[in-house]
Structures are given as structure tokens and as C-alpha cells.
Image (cartoon, rainbow, N blue to C red):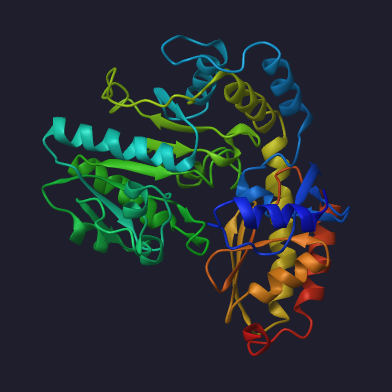
Amino acid sequence: MNSEEIIELNHKFVIDTYGKQRSLALVRGNGSRVQDADGKTYLDFLSGLAVNGLGHCHPKVVEAITNQAKTLIHVSNLYYNEPQVKLAERLVKHSFAAKCFFCNSGAEANEAAIKLARKWGHTSGNGPGIITLRNSFHGRTIATITATGQEKFQRNFHPLLESFKYASLNDLKSIEEALDEGTCGVLLELIQAEGGVNVATREFAQGLRKLCAERNLLLILDEVQTGMGRTGRLFAYEHYDIEPDIVTLAKSLGGGVPIGAMLAGPKVADVFQPGDHASTFGGNPLASAAALAAIEVITSAGFLENARELSRYLFERLRKVADKHAFIKEVRGAGMLIGIEFSSAVKKVVGDCADRGLIVGTAGENVLRLLPPLTTTRSEIDEALGIIEAALEGFTDESAQT
């Protein structure tokens, strides 16, 4: 099938919940590149919205999936399976956590975190209240859009869940003002990826950790996008020298295969009991095998150090580009999670980049978002920067409106 035929079938049979950035029908990928149904190749600096942290079809992940698919694809969580327990062991070994819960997506991982926090809140005498941050994004279920501090995701889905309050990133006082006797925890992203690539300061993160400890509150970190090496460390919280009580993961965890996880620290590791929560497909052998292979690659000697070095190079190049254009206000982020804030809408830049063979994304209307694979190369960064610079030629705030 060619692109036109695939797109026609999509319009006819698929519920249209995504605003497609471009009429691209992608059929294969390898490393940092993808190809559409008409044979055109693109450099992918969106990485499937941060899912393809190891690029497309990483050989270690492909091998693990192939071998597992020949052995055992799925078994009910009423029984034990070896890849799942090995994955849990590996995640605990590399983190603060004592135990793990597995599911299928970031939204499900955040649902699990919300339920765990609420149960702990009720049993500890705190209550069910959770504070989240404005401009956050935690998923598309009713609970997670309630947690999401952006009204545009909540519109037309009221009534929302009770016992959520909103505060502001890098404003510890706003969190203190939102606290009450029914609060059990604070849920946040250390980098608000969907909300504009807004980065928590070290002072804020450490102050929040201290506040949660003093008030006997849970510190819950949504690392669905920042986890598994995206920021140059396995987890974003490592940059801040803090330890959370709960962390949620998905996206890059499975190397492209759907899997989510909730990591629970010692304070809450044994709060859930049989019957409290479940996920039919969560941590099945196929997804767990893929995740094990992905973690093996990410934690291998020199891998993250190389990713950090490439990130420094990419930031340096981008800031030089920004210096040439008054309409670029800021370049921010960490590792391979980068936001370039413009003074006007960036939709035109995204489209012009795609026309030139580079896939990039947005984080809100005015922020260009780059999510290169951790496996990208310096020459691919140079290629991408050349395309971005070409797309910016002649760009003005006025042209962005057309």
C-alpha cells in the first residue's frame, strides 16, 4: 500500500483522536531513520514521542522479542513468569525502589501511583488528596487528566475526580498553600515535557523532597518521558540528588514495545495487597523481555556517558542557532529532551522540517520539541541541525501565522 491508500483507510476506519502533523504513513525504521510507504526516508528526532529511546528496531531488542515470541508470549498474572521478575529485579537494582508493579502505558502507571498513594493516605490517616502542577501532563484517563494541570485536556470530560489541587513548578510556596490535612502526596514531572519542556530547579526539587519528609507526604515522580536515560541519567531524579517514594515509567522502557511500570519505595512497597490493583497484560513475558534488553543496553558501560556528550554538543549547536534568530526565546531541557521556545507558533517549522526529511514535534503551541534517540550520532545531529537552520530561513512571527 502507498501512503495515500493507508491514509484513506485511516480516515474511513480509525477514530480520529490525533491531529496528524503531516500526512506521513511510516512503514519501517532502522536506528534514527524511518521510511514512509512511498519510499521517502526521514531522520526521526521525535522517537515515537520518546518511546524509541534506542532508535528503531535496535538489534538487542529485536533479538529479545524474537526469542521470547518463540517461547511464551503471554501468561496470566495469576502465575509467575521469569522475564517479569528479572525485569523487576533489574529496575530495583538500578533505582530507589523496593518493588515494582507492571502495566501497559504511562497513563496506567500514573493510575497505579494515584491509587497506591490514596490507599496509603487512607491507611496512614492523611487522606486521599494529591497536589499536581500546572502545565503538567499525566495521561488521558479520567484520573490522569484530573491530575494533568492543563484545562484543554479536561474540557468536556467533567465531572473530574475529587481531591486534586494544583500548584506551580519551581514555586514551593504554592505547594505549601495547597496543602491541607487531607493531602497524601505531590505528583510531578521534574521536566514537564508535554507542557513546554519546563525544567524543575535543583532548589525546588530538594525543597519539595524536604517538605514531603517533614509533612509525611509521598513524593511521586512521573518519569514516563524522562525515565530510561532520556535526560542523560537512567532517571531524571538522579540529577537532583533526591529519592522519591514512587516513580512511574513507560515510553522508552520497552524499547518500542508497550509496557509501563510503577516503582515503589520502601514506604509504600507493601501497601497494595492482592485484589487492590491489576493489569491483565502488565509485565507479560514478551514486553518484559523487550524491556530487559533495553535496560541492558542503556546501562551498559559508556552508553549514557556517550549520550550526555552528544547532548552537550546538540545544546551547544542549538544555542548558536538561537543566537542568530530573535524569535527564539530559549533552548532548554536535559539530555535528549529539548525544547526550543519561539515567540510564535512553531507548526510551520515542524512542517518545513518534515518536508526536508526531519521529524520533530511540539510541546505546546510555541515550543519545538526534539527527542532524538539516545543512539543518535554526531553526524545525524549535524544533519538535523542543517535541516532546522534551513527551515528557519525566512521564518518570522508573521509567517508562523500562515
With respect to residue 41, does 84 lie above or below? Answer: above
Q: What is the residue that sits farthest to the right in this orientation?
A: 39
Place of residue 21 in the rendered image (x, y in percent of width and height, measured from the top left): 66, 64
The quadrant of the rendering that contains the C terminus is bottom right
Tell me where residue 390 appears, x and y as whole percent: 82, 75
Drawn side of residue 81 relative to residue 23, left or right: left
Q: Quadrant of residue 347?
A: bottom right
**Residue 28 showing in the rendered view:** yes
Measuring from the top left, give residue 355's x and y in whole percent.
80, 68
Seen from the viewer's position, the closer of residues 92 and 120 is: 120
Q: Residue at x 36, y 48 (%)?
A: 144
Left or right placement of residue 344 versus residue 168 in this view: right
Q: Nearer the viewer, residue 351 or 158?
A: 158
Give the residue drawn at x 76%, y 72%: 352
Q: Residue furthest front?
A: 12
The answer to whether residue 266 is above or below residue 339 is: above
Left or right: residue 265 versus residue 241 is: left
